[in-house]
């Protein structure tokens, strides 16, 4: 029998989430961010389901190649920009836009041979301090780009938020985001071009940041990174169900210990289920005992250490769980945000970490 571990991708949820984004940002064009294999949901599958998006955002040229090979004709933006002069020919060949965030990229563009012009998204660093031009260098970079015949006439101005998941009702009171918006406005005052600021959290909570282009990723997959809130709290639907089955059910005596390092002690005689999933499938090893899991639709908990191929589950409270019973690790009935919380990470990391031996199906 094939290993029963699968990730079901709900393409109708992807479409629903895109329409939710459009409702929230009705005057913006939507760039669907599909980096990291569509946040682990499958690049081509996601791009086809989100065919209504105005553009796609990727982090690797190889992903842009895959999208073009799959017949995707919308604009594609290389979010982190290109690395070396040879990439410029690939951008042209694929008709892919690039972020320009560093002087070295400006110089490569200035020295590039004549050819089809490339659309550039000039990236500002307004306080994230990862990629981008400092505000005082933006006007100069904009002028240099705009003067190039290798660059499409109108440059798009972009920014990335560090803390847009902290809203006005949060302890920080949205300070960082408001500061970034102000710096962006000051640095770009008088410069021609469309603006793009908002990631998912800003689409959901910072309408003043919507501008001409929004760039949601997580929201399209139904996920939230806002503390204490799931995608469903924003009207989004999870696009992935991760599931498997019980392959063993054992009666274990009180006082016996379960799994590697014998970390969990049975407080009474009890049934322990063994599910065919572990960190070798991408389920986080950091998920401690107590992490929620559904068996036959009923919520119970992980016990003991998650191992490579297997995990152990408390079956008290699920008395009729048998070998073969369905196990849901996350999905519409169990928000992935809860598992991420338990494992000390964010939902995005979990869906990105599903490994190749997991069977992907649509449904
Ligand atoms: C990943 C990314 C996004 C999308 O972020 P989400 O939180 O998933 O919406 C937007 N813009 C840039 C530059 C990114 O790298």
Image (spheres, helix red, strand yellow):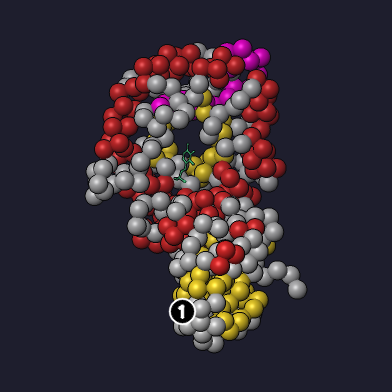
Quarter of the image for the C terminus: give it. Answer: bottom right
Q: Position of residue 265 (x, y in %)?
A: 50, 73
All told, the count of numbered labels is 1
User: Could one spot residue 302 in this view of the protein?
Assistant: no
Q: Using the image, determine if residue 149 lies above or below residue 72.
A: above
Please tell me which residue lies in front, 342 or 89.
Answer: 342
Crowd around label 1: few <14 · some 14–19 · many ≥20 (10 Å): few
- Identified at 43% across, 22% down, the residue is 133
Does residue 254 appear anywhere in the picture? yes
Q: Considering only vertical position in the picture, is 33 above or below 99?
A: below
Q: Give residue 84's quadrant in the image.
A: top right
The part of the chain drawn in magenta is 109-125
Q: Residue at x 48, y 66 (%)?
A: 289
Would you say residue 168 sits in the magenta stretch?
no
x and y percent of residue 115 in the render? 65, 19
The quadrant the N terminus occupies is bottom right
Q: State the residue position of label 1.
A: 267
């Amino acid at each position: 029998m094939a290993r029963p571990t699968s990730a079901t991708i709900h393409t109708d949820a992807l479409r629903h989430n895109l329409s939710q984004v459009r409702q929230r940002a009705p005057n913006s064009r939507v760039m669907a961010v599909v980096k990291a294999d569509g946040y682990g949901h499958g690049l081509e599958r996601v791009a086809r389901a989100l065919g209504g998006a105005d553009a796609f955002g990727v982090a690797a040229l190889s992903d842009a190649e895959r999208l073009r090979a799959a017949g995707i004709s919308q604009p594609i933006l290389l979010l982190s920009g290109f690395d070396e002069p040879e990439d410029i020919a690939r951008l042209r060949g694929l008709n892919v836009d690039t972020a320009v965030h560093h002087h070295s990229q400006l110089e490569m563009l200035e020295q590039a041979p004549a050819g089809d012009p490339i659309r550039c998204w000039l990236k500002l660093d307004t306080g994230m301090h990862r990629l981008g031009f400092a505000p005082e260098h933006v006007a100069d970079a904009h002028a240099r780009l705009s003067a190039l015949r290798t660059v499409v006439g109108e440059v798009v101005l972009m920014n990335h938020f560090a803390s847009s998941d902290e809203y006005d009702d949060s302890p920080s009171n949205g300070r960082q985001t408001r500061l970034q918006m102000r710096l962006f406005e000051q640095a770009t005052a008088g410069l021609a071009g469309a603006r793009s600021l908002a990631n998912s959290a800003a689409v959901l909570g910072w309408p003043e940041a919507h501008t001409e282009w929004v760039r949601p990723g997580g929201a399209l997959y139904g996920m939230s990174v806002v503390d204490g809130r799931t995608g469903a709290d924003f009207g989004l639907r999870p696009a992935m169900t991760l599931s498997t089955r019980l392959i063993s059910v054992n009666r274990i005596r009180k006082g016996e210990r379960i799994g590697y390092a014998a970390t969990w002690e049975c407080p009474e005689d009890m049934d322990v289920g063994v599910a065919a999933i572990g960190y070798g499938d991408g389920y986080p090893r950091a998920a401690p005992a107590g992490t929620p899991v559904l068996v036959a639709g009923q919520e119970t908990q992980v016990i003991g250490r998650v191992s490579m191929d297997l995990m152990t589950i408390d079956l008290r409270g699920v008395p009729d769980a048998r070998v073969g019973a369905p196990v849901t690790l996350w999905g519409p009935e169990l928000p992935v945000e809860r598992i991420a919380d338990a494992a000390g990470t964010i939902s995005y990391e979990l869906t990105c970490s599903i490994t190749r031996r997991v069977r992907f199906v649509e449904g």
